[in-house]
Image: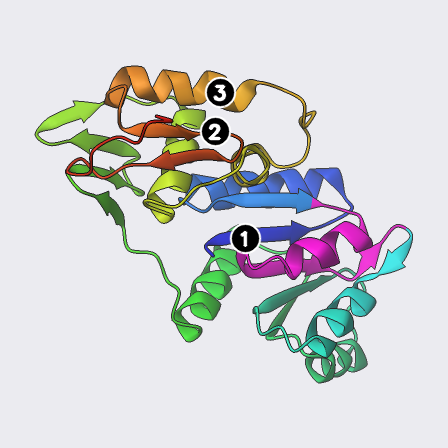
Amino acid sequence: MSGILVVEDEPTIADFVERGLRAHGHSTAVTDEPDRALALALSGEFALIVLDLGLPGGDGFDVLRAVRERRHDVPVLVLTAQFEERDAVACLEAGADDYMTKPFRFEELLARVAALLRRTGTPEGRVLHAGDLQLDLLTRRAKLGDRTVDLTAREFLLLGAFLRHPDKVLSREQLLSQVWGYSFDPRTNIVSVYVGSLRKKLGADRIETVRGMGYRLRPVDTPPTRDG
């Protein structure tokens, strides 16, 4: 559980928040649909939710209340365009952990996100590790042993997703949501294409294919499985 779910119906704001969070090493998924937002919030895949109150076909308050009624303790940072004091009180009473008003500075949003992750004990360090493989989230550089590995922006996000879940099988759907969001057709082969690209740079055995399930990042000292 390490991603950030962004629930926002204004494309410009959603893109602004998503790009900023990813630039600082966070994996993200974005939706503007209340039903999908609730399903994703309860999936256990996200460490934090950034939730807009005004959604098409629903209300952000309804999503927040539904999450808390199920006793799900994922932290929620609420965004609202029409701020009044009663909105803040209602948000907090409904279970929000913090709130911000639009327009906002991204630096402030990032600081509040970091504070909520620290509060819940899920902050990320600057460098992710798995065996002799490491990824620096600040410099966006990967190293394999003593060798520096050059990555594209999307390869960086995909490797980060694997390193946050070492030795865990990640499905194509999970990788699509964490790396590409939900703007891509779920039938696309984009995941396999980028996994192949990472294998060329990290070694063919480093990322295993688990037949019928997805992919797994294998520590260097673990022998490959028969499906790899």
The image shows residue 75, relative to residue 158, as above or below, that is below
Residue drawn 23% across the image and 43% down it: 130
Q: Nearer the viewer, residue 82 or 211?
A: 211
In the picture provided, is 215 more to the left or to the right than 16?
left
Amino acid type at circle 3 is Ser
Which residue type carries mark 2?
Arg
* The furthest residue to the right: 57
- Helix, strand or loop for disc 1: strand
Q: Quadrant of residue 220?
A: top left
The amino acid pointed to by label 1 is Ile
**Magenta range:** 31-56
- Between disc 3 and disc 1, the foreground one is 3
Please indicate, yes or no, whether residue 102 appears anywhere in the rendered image. no
Q: Is 128 in front, or is 131?
A: 131
- Looking at the picture, how far across and down is residue 25, in whole percent? 40, 44
Labels 1, 2: front one:
2
User: Which residue position is annotated with label 1?
Assistant: 4
Location of residue 202 with respect to 108 vertically, above or below: above
Q: Which residue is mark 2?
A: 211
Pointer 3 residue: 192
Image-based side of 175 in relation to 133, left or right: right
Going from N to C along the chain, the mark reached first, 2 or 3, is 3
Report the residue at 54% width, 54% height from top.
45
In percent of width and height, residue 82 lies at 81, 64
Asked if the residue under mark 2 is in contact with the one under mark 1, i.e. CB atoms within 8 Å, the reply is no
- Please give the name of the residue rendered at 30% of the width and 31% of the height, measured from the top-left corner: 225
Q: Residues within 10 Å of mark 2 (few under 14, many from 20)?
A: few
Return the x and y of residue 85 as percentages of the image width and height.
Answer: 76, 81
